[in-house]
Image (cartoon, grey):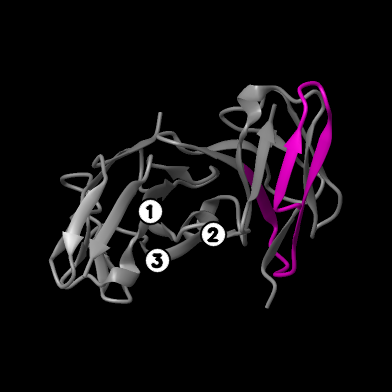
Amino acid sequence: GNSVTQMEGPVTLSEEAFLTINCTYTATGYPSLFWYVQYPGEGLQLLLKATKADDKGSNKGFEATYRKETTSFHLEKGSVQVSDSAVYFCALRQAGTALIFGKGTTLSVSS
Amino acid sequence: NAGVTQTPKFQVLKTGQSMTLQCAQDMNHNSMYWYRQDPGMGLRLIYYSASEGTTDKGEVPNGYNVSRLNKREFSLRLESAAPSQTSVYFCASSEGAGGGGSSYGYTFGSGTRLTVV
């Protein structure tokens, strides 16, 4: 069945460092891919998405490219801030199904 | 701009008690979902409703029931709570359930933190 695998956390970075959170997926067909962010004590918010191969989703300085050949959707940001500290979830959705989430990666950014 | 509203925000139950978690959305979305979030497990789908009048089991439905009361409301019921149901519960909604709707993301509520003792 479909599944999403994210890198284990926590990821600890200093402010202004480069961020990569790896995400790979297993799916038949052509799913849509998503990154969600969860700040402490809150629900999940959609960060970005891509709906077909080679699409790049971007928002708030974060970006991720849908790579069908490597079944990946890695999240990147060039310069993280303390306010980016949160849990990040990679997810996929295929026609007729609900979102399937990875287990989440905790990011902690210190000043 | 309320989005998805969940009540209550916090609840403590004794083993064997029952309760209903309420969820309402004001975005005219067709599909609604219930997930539970546990440490190291990510979010797991309990039940979903692709449209008003339909409900389907997700990955972890045992011990839960749902009701899609109308297009806006989707409730989750625990008939006899167990400690294993201690979790954070999230309700979500989206415009579509499948086909072209697979590109739709979800809007989440802020969660219900449930402890069963």
3 and 2 marks on the same chain: yes
Q: CA distance from mark 3 to mark 2?
A: 14 Å
Of label 3 and label 2, which has the lower sequence position?
2
- Looking at the rendered structure, which numbered label has been put on residue A87? 1
1 and 3 marks on the same chain: yes
Check the residue under mark 3 and report the chain it is in: A
Q: Quadrant of the N terminus of chain A?
A: top left
Instruction: Determine the secondary structure under disc 2.
Output: loop
Give A29 or A91, whichever is nearer the viewer: A91
- Circle 3: is it few (<14), some (14-19), or many (20+) Cα within 10 Å? many
Instruction: Determine the secondary structure under disc 1.
Output: strand
Circle 2: residue type: Glu
- Looking at the rendered structure, which numbered label has been put on residue A42? 2
Q: CA distance from mark 1 to mark 2?
A: 10 Å
Q: Is residue A37 visible?
A: yes
Residue placed under numbered mark 3 in the picture: A47
Relative to A68, is B36 above or below?
above
Circle 1: residue type: Val
Image spot of residue B41 (x, y percent): 44, 34
Q: Quadrant of residue A107?
A: bottom left
Find the magenta span and give its range: B8-34
- Circle 1: is it few (<14), some (14-19), or many (20+) Cα within 10 Å? many
Query: What residue is at 25 percent from the left and 39 percent from the top?
Result: A8
Check the residue under mark 1 and report the chain it is in: A
